[in-house]
Amino acid sequence: MNVRRYRPDDFSQLQQWGERYHITYSEENLPTIGFIVPGVAAYFLYETKTKVVFLENMIANSDAPKAERSEALKLIVERILSEAKRMGYHVAYACTDIPSVIQRAVASGATFKTKYVLLQKDLTK
């Protein structure tokens, strides 16, 4: 299974996958660092000017076999954490309320911190 850096020409895949989950992606809101197994799954790394990095927008192709999605996400998580460490980050945060994602994170050594509400403010208005 080939994990590689996300490229802008992969965006149409994200759009298709997102539609199935009622998620709308915007190219301008995606970071420049992400990893993808083409046709299967992707995940993104949001940089900060601190030693903290945020991992967001994990998505998988719901048409791909479950075992393939699971393996792809496992490999992508390993790769994205390795990249964050290589970049000098000390802590990686991720947010989710999806039980399988929580289980995957805990299995990779993450600790559950707190349940909270994610708030958004549109700064263009």
Image (cartoon, rainbow, N blue to C red):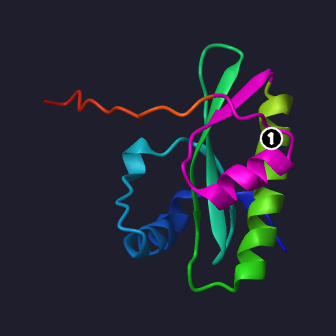
The quarter of the picture where residue 18 lies is bottom left
Q: As drawn, is 119 to the left or to the right of 14?
A: left
In the rendered picture of this protein, how many numbered marks are placed on residues?
A: 1
Mark 1 highlights which residue? 81
Task: Identify which residue, 108 or 57, lies in the foreground.
Answer: 108
User: Dot 1: few (<14), some (14–19), or many (≥20) neighbours within 10 Å?
Assistant: some
Q: As drawn, is 16 to the left or to the right of 109?
A: left
Residue at the outermost top position: 50
Q: As drawn, is 115 to the left or to the right of 40?
A: left
Q: Which residues are magenta?
A: 88-113
Question: Which quadrant does the C terminus fall into?
Answer: top left
Secondary structure state at the residue bearing disc 1:
helix
Question: Which quadrant does the N terminus fall into?
Answer: bottom right
- Residue appearing at x 48%, y 31% in the figure: 116
- Classify 13 as above or below 88: below
Residue 35 visible in rendering = no
Q: Is residue 98 magenta?
A: yes
Q: Position of residue 88 (x, y in %)?
A: 81, 22
Q: Position of residue 55 (x, y in %)?
A: 63, 40
Q: Amino acid at mark 1?
A: Leu
